[in-house]
Image (cartoon, grey):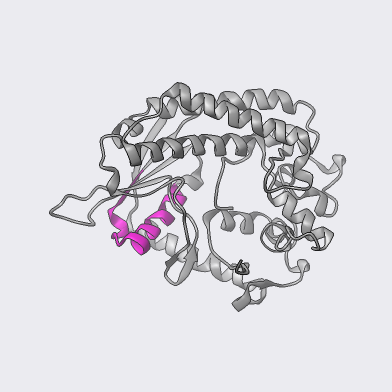
């Protein structure tokens, strides 16, 4: 098996981590490397194990996205639709498996194979109640997906014109010379035959509430559509579909000023990431002292790396567990 290397690739979620807490960025993207090896130093093994942890909101989001991806796959390859009952029952099995795996403790030695839930791991007293409430989010989200006009519209399209969908294997794309990792839940070539490459539709399904970052994310997807599929980024239209607590389907376009701003932020962000590297060519970071922890206690409350961050691994240093409710939706490109 060929040796893999830790390459620097930009993603929207990586930028968010870099901007919010450099210490978490270092632990998640550098110290964890090689932590899967049995002879790795203990701190690397710990960083790797914690990097595989999830949380109840993230587990809910992952299951929703996986079930939607399965619906896409089945329709794309045999033009049949999964029943709502099948979607929900499969999701329930996924959810119960995740809870059981976390309680089993098997993640201690096999963190990649078994789920470890942050609320359980960190001893949040009412985590089981939270889990029951979070299952409601999963079920509501899947019912919203099945009832959405977006899913009905997609079933009227020709799957051969789907450019990408959640579940596809994915590699990074060069945008302005920068390797960018990220793709939408589904992209569709909606161009007329007489005017090819004139319309690219992007669809994003969210199991959390609307956030400002969702609009920003679409701008980067427009840049990916230009680099990977040859569309003018101004031809991109997006539909953001929020599935919980109620169904919201919101369309948006990206204007030239927004695209220029996205390109500028992308280049500046990537330069900032390279500025903390001792060897940019081989993606080797500076010493950990170049990655200070955030001073925002609300971010510390939901950080998986508290035990590796001085002054933040004790119960007294943690904000109330209620702060966990604000955690972001699932993001596969961490």
Residue at 51% across / 41% down in the picture?
Answer: 211
Residue 223: name its quadrant.
bottom left
Above or below 24: residue 277 = below
Would you say residue 247 is visible in this rendering? no
Residues drawn in magenta:
215-238
28 or 311, which lies in front? 28
- 58 left or right, relative to 26: left
* Furthest residue in direction front, as rendered: 1
Above or below 317: residue 100 = above
Would you say residue 54 is visible in this rendering? yes
- Residue 91: image x %, image y %? 54, 29
Above or below 318: residue 28 = below
Residue at 60% across / 69% down in the picture?
Answer: 2
- Residue 149: image x %, image y %? 33, 30
Is residue 70 found inside the magenta-colored segment of the image?
no
Above or below 235: residue 128 = above
Is residue 221 found inside the magenta-colored segment of the image?
yes
Please state, as top left, top right, bottom left or bottom right, where the N terminus lies in the image.
bottom right
Residue at 78% across / 57% down in the picture?
Answer: 45
- Residue 37: image x %, image y %? 75, 60
- Residue 104: image x %, image y %? 77, 34
Main SS class of the magenta portion in the image: helix
- 172 left or right, relative to 161: right
- 232 left or right, relative to 7: left
1 or 275, which lies in front? 1
Residue 318: name its quadrant.
top right
**Tag count:** 0
Residue at 40% across / 40% down in the picture?
Answer: 73
């Amino acid at each position: 098996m060929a040796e893999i290397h830790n390459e620097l690739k930009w993603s929207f979620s990586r930028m968010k981590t870099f901007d919010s807490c450099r210490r978490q960025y270092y632990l998640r993207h550098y110290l964890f490397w090689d932590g899967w090896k049995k002879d790795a130093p203990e701190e690397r093994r710990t960083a790797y194990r914690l990097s595989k942890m999830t949380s109840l909101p993230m587990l809910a989001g992952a299951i929703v996205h996986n079930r939607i991806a399965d619906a896409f796959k089945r329709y794309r390859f045999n033009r049949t639709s999964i029943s709502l009952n099948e979607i929900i029952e499969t999701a329930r099995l996924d959810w119960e498996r995740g809870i059981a795996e976390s309680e089993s403790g098997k993640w201690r030695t096999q963190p990649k194979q078994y789920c470890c839930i942050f609320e359980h791991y960190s001893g949040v007293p009412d985590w089981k109640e939270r889990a029951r409430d979070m299952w409601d989010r999963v079920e509501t989200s899947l019912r919203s997906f099945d009832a959405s006009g977006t899913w009905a519209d997609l079933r009227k399209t020709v799957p051969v014109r789907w450019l990408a969908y959640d579940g596809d294997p994915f590699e990074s794309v060069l945008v302005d010379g920068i390797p960018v990792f990220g793709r939408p839940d589904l992209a569709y070539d909606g161009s007329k035959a007489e005017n090819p490459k004139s319309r690219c539709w992007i669809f994003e399904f969210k199991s959390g509430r609307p956030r400002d970052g969702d609009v920003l994310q679409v701008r980067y997807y427009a840049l990916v559509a230009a680099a990977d599929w040859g569309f003018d980024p101004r031809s991109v239209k997006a539909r953001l579909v929020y599935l919980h607590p109620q169904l919201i389907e919101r369309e948006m376009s990206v204007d030239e000023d927004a695209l220029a701003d996205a390109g500028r932020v992308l280049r500046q962000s990537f330069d900032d990431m390279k500025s903390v590297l001792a060897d940019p060519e081989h993606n080797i970071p500076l010493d950990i002292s170049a990655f200070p922890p955030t001073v925002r206690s609300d971010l510390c409350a939901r950080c998986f790396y508290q035990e590796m961050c001085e002054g933040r691994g004790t119960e007294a240093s943690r904000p109330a567990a209620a702060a966990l409710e604000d955690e972001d939706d699932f993001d596969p490109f961490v």
